[in-house]
Image (spheres, helix red, strand yellow):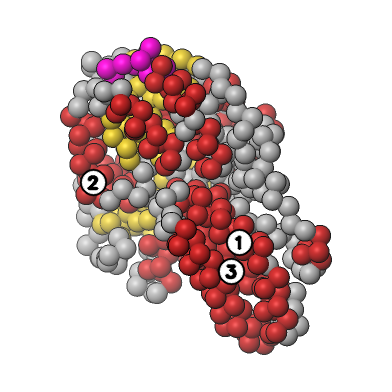
Amino acid sequence: MKTNTQSKNRFYPYQEKDIQILFDEMESNVKKKLLYQLPTGGGKTIVFSEIARRFMIQFGKKVVILTHRRELCTQTSKTLIKTGVKNQIISSTGGNFKPEYDCYVAMVETLRNRIKSKKVKTDDVGLVIIDEAHHNSFRKLMGSFKKAFVIGVTATPFSSDISKPMNRFYHSIITGENIADLIADGYLAKPESYVYEVELNSLKTGLHGDYTVSSSNELYSSPAMQELLLKAYLEHSKGKKTLIFNNGITASLKVHETFRQAGIAVKHLDNKTSDDERKEILKWFKKTKDAVLTSVSILTTGFDEPTVENIILNRATTSITLYHQMIGRGSRKLPSKKTFSIIDLGNNMQRFGAWEQPVDWKFVFEHPDAFAKQLQYQSTGGSSLQSHSLSAVLRAQFPNTLEMTFDIEGHYQEAVDMDKKTKTVIQQSIRQQAKMCLDNAETLSQAIALAEALQPEIEWRVKQYVKCLENASRNYKQWLMEDYQNRLRGLIIKLYPKVTAA
């Protein structure tokens, strides 16, 4: 093994205790899958980096650490080096397992592609560590590491997909210190919360349970909400370094305009911002004392700026994971920062309780359905999918298809969260409808006729996708409609011989 025998980190007592518990579990059952929970700001990356170091020394096998964002790969690699672990990042631009390394850091899709193309071998991997384990995309890789011990790490052990609870994959959970105790012991900053009750009746929910981008944009871009946001900022956080979280680009750009007109130093950041511009904006945010950064789906994970003094939730969410991730961006403690403020403009604290309020994560892990009901996870605000009902005539043409709907906005948000290209949403939609046509046709001509019957549904899906893009032109929408139809027909023709042969 090429790993240093002496860790370069000093651990807090609660971290050392958790590391020892995890090792005791590994020694008692080498085929176990463990879930480890520790709040945002508690030092999860430091803990699992030390676990990786000790595992390689004690068991003499390699370690793979999986993340779902490029930023987390880099962040994890740096922490491993500080811990004394020489490691290699497996990136999309190149890199296979090199024998001089015993520890590898990779995004799940990148590593999956390497394994499928047989460019990397996984036989000598003894431990797989999964960061942000509440995401379900990691499961597709676990068949390649059947002999390895698996440790999932998350602040919120509640699956991003309620139909795939975490206790189906992990055997047991180990919970670390709760937020309240970390605050009381001086490890995290103490929050000061300000809640403004907001009427959310206009919000709609998608298939995945969270509020849609389009309905959130409409509400939070309104003059009344912009006025309330600015008022709340001036009353409680004027002059403080502030992060504002939004659910849509349109709303965030409106925030940028409102604050700029008020003479406040502000910048906007979203997943479409180029890498170079993003680096410049984050550099500006770091060095500017009273900076305000309004963002969308980009700073909830893999972002660590301890000087943030104020968090504004300019959105509502039904995801307790997202709720904790957003607020956690302000919880880092500094010698000059003992507290931070939270402004809630989405009734989120009413929905989940105070951020620092202890949660029985063991109960959540063991009884996810009961916990989901407690949170009223399925919103009663009215689903965008429910408001789009398929006609009985159309449904009757697909008797062999159980589920004909497809949550465009939900899949779009998932693509953004997983750092995938958003065009994959259209690809998934086309594949689903091609399968529907093939499953309900006896001949190729019948399958193509069914595709033509889906025209109203296709138009609705394209419309929802364009709404997610927010700034797409009318010409692009028309082109996308035609391209969608052509690709659907082409995929049916391509797959038909294979399906009939099967």
Inter-mark Cα distance, 2 to 3: 35 Å
Question: In front of the other: label 2 or label 1?
Answer: 1
Residue 83 is tagged as none
**Position of 390 compared to 35: left or right?**
right
| Local secondary structure at mark 1 | helix
The reply to whether the magenta stretch includes residue 314 is: no
Residue denoted by label 2: 277
Residue neighbourhood size for the residue with mark 3, other residues' Cα within 10 Å, grouped as few (<14), some (14–19), many (≥20): some
Residue denoted by label 3: 431
Q: Residue at x 37, y 47 (%)?
A: 271
| Local secondary structure at mark 2 | helix
Inter-mark Cα distance, 3 to 1: 16 Å
Q: Nearer the viewer, residue 391 or 104?
A: 391
Q: Residue at x 54, y 74 (%)?
A: 487
Q: Nearer the viewer, residue 85 or 380?
A: 380
Q: Which residues are magenta?
A: 232-241
Q: Quadrant of residue 268?
A: top left
Query: Closer to the N terminus: mark 2 or mark 3?
Result: 2
Residue neighbourhood size for the residue with mark 1, other residues' Cα within 10 Å, grouped as few (<14), some (14–19), many (≥20): some
Residue 108: image location, x then y, percent: 42, 57
Q: Quadrant of residue 246?
A: top left
**Position of 486 compared to 107: left or right?**
right
